[in-house]
Amino acid sequence: MISLVDIAPILLLMEALLELADYYFNEKKYEEAIEFYAEMDQRGFSDGQRNEITFRHGYCLFMKKRYDEASAKFSALMSKDGPYYYSGHYYYGMSNFYGQDYTEAIKAWKVAEKSANYRREIPYYIVQIYAAEKDYDQLLAYAVPLVQDGRVKNDAEINQLIGQAYFERGDYAKALPHLEYYESNSKN
């Protein structure tokens, strides 16, 4: 049987590793933070602490463009309710977007966009995917109601993609107002 005396040094070591990892995370020294997060045995931490460690570790990996590894960390947060549920979905989607797994990205973002923190910015990424895949029916079904409500960021760019979708379908009359909106509201 293991006693508290036996595990106390291990718990102290894990706390020290967490302090160092969090220090480097807060200093935006992500490579160093990754090293310390990776060394941790999280069994001595509460569920909330483990979720935070997992999120921060995933975020560091994401910032270092290690998208496959980041995706694995964020996926661990997607089935758990709590403060990292929507963030986990958002960054899982972003990791998959940059890793070019667009199907997984869209699935994750459809959950994350239910959060007020992400609701306005996710549509632009989804519309970009539909445009890149030339899935104009999906693009129009998804994007037209959003720009009519004015609920999105990058509405000029989304209008441009809507206009291009209509143009590609040969519906020039519907394309024109969206392209004109883009022209009058774009910085370019």
Image (cartoon, rainbow, N blue to C red):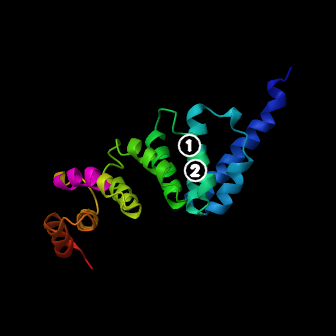
- Helix, strand or loop for disc 1: helix
Mark on residue 75? 1
Q: Nearer the viewer, residue 54 or 135?
A: 135
Query: Looking at the image, is 45 positioned above or below residue 163?
Result: above
Q: What residue appears at the point 28 percent right and 50 percent down from the top-left corner?
A: 142
Q: Position of residue 19 (x, y in %)?
A: 65, 49
- What residue is pinned by disc 2? 71
Quarter of image, res 46: top right
Judge from the rendering whether residue 2 lies leftward or rightward of residue 52; answer left or right: right
The dot on residue 14 is: none
| Residue farthest toward the top in the current orientation of the protein | 1
Hey, what amino acid is under mark 1? Ser
User: Residue 152: percent from the left, percent from the top?
Assistant: 26, 55
Q: Secondary structure at mark 2?
A: helix
**In the displayed structure image, the side of residue 95 where residue 160 appears, left or right:** left
x 55%, y 35%: residue: 48
Query: Residue 28: in sight, yes or no?
Result: no
Q: Which SS does the magenta portion mostly show? A: helix
Q: Read off the magenta span.
A: 139-148
Give the amino acid at mark 2. Answer: Ser
Q: Is residue 135 something that shows in the picture?
A: yes
Contact? badges 2 and 1 (CB < 8 Å): yes
Direction from residue 69 to residue 94 in the image, left or right: left
